[in-house]
Amino acid sequence: MTYQGNKASACGGSTSAAGAPSPAHEEETLLLDGVGYAYRGKDSHEVLSGICTGFREKTMYAVTGPSGSGKTTLLSLLAGLDAPTSGRILLKGKDIREGGLLAYRRDAMSLVFQSYNLIDYLTVRENVLLGGPCDPDTLLTRVGIDAGLRGRSVLRLSGGQQQRVAIARALAGTSEVLLADEPTGNLDEETEASIIDVLKRCAHEDGKCVIVVTHSSRVCAAADEVVELSRINKAAS
């Protein structure tokens, strides 16, 4: 496990004169190039500023920081749910806004929520199929859901089992990036360990770029890299 400080300390040095990523960043799946975000209006304030860091495939990252440090905002930007007010987010060297954020969300990333966000009137298999064309039984086997549970409503599953189904749904597509928002926040210690193992295998065996926003010290200890947001967010200075 390593810690990221101000990884790309000068954003101006991370791109070429033509605006393309420098060779040093070509291996990164996602690159944040001077990313900032400010809320406008009566209570306008800057939440993120000057963030320069990258995320690679086959790696599990833990993004951590105190409440109010901008973790949720950063996740929204990485997920394409909102756009930076300054800087760029690059996927394989291209600004994610070029092809439209809708296409980015559909094709390039999957999101796992703390509250699972499963459809309660559908079965386990049917929920997984919502993620895209796939063999749901293969994915459910990988995340440890027994065959006898797969035809049940998700409401009959435990919290840990529901989170496994949510991860299987995220794996159903062909996305390169898996984002997880406090995926173990509602789970006991033993179940948390099993979910961490599933996420690590998504990175190391499936080759995905796995980014987990978390307060959990166990998730941080298991991650390949820990990104301490307060260290790279100039708005926190």
Image (cartoon, rainbow, N blue to C red):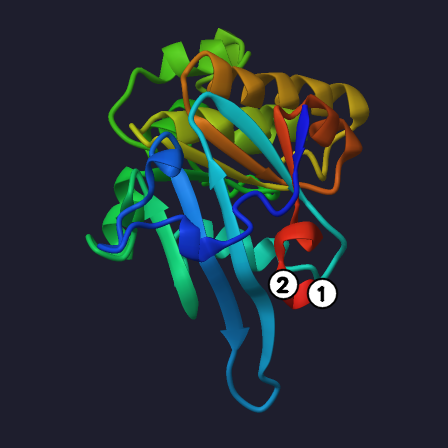
Identify the residue under disc 2. Answer: 234
Work out whether 48 lies above or below 125.
Answer: below
Using residue 45 as the reference point, say whether residue 124 is left or right of it.
Answer: left
Residue extending furthest toward the bottom: 42
> Can residue 79 be seen in this snapshot?
no
Quadrant of the snapshot with the N terminus: top right
User: In terms of secondary structure, where does tag 2 sit?
Assistant: helix
Q: Amino acid at mark 1?
A: Ser
Q: Amino acid at mark 2?
A: Lys
Q: Nearer the viewer, residue 182 or 135?
A: 182
User: In terms of secondary structure, where does tag 1 sit?
Assistant: loop
Point out residue 106 in the picture as x, y percentages from the top left corner.
Answer: 28, 43
Point out residue 127 in the picture as x, y percentages from the top left corner.
Answer: 40, 31
The residue that appears at 26% across and 39% down in the rendered structure is 107
The residue that appears at 72% across and 38% down in the rendered structure is 186
Residue 237 disc label = 1
Point out residue 184 in the picture as x, y percentages from the top left corner.
Answer: 68, 33
Q: Nearer the viewer, residue 19 or 177?
A: 19
> Can residue 234 be seen in this snapshot?
yes
Point out residue 144 in the picture as x, y percentages from the top left corner.
Answer: 55, 11
The residue that appears at 44% across and 30% down in the rendered structure is 56
Using residue 197 as the reference point, say whether residue 220 is left or right of it.
Answer: right
The residue that appears at 76% across and 27% down in the rendered structure is 218
Marks 1 & 2, CB-CB < 8 Å contact? yes
Residue 91 disc label = none
Q: Nearer the viewer, residue 78 or 92?
A: 92
Location of residue 27 (image quadrant): top left
Q: CA distance from mark 1 to mark 2?
A: 5 Å
Q: Give the crowd class for mark 2: few <14, some 14-19, many >=20 residues within 10 Å.
A: some
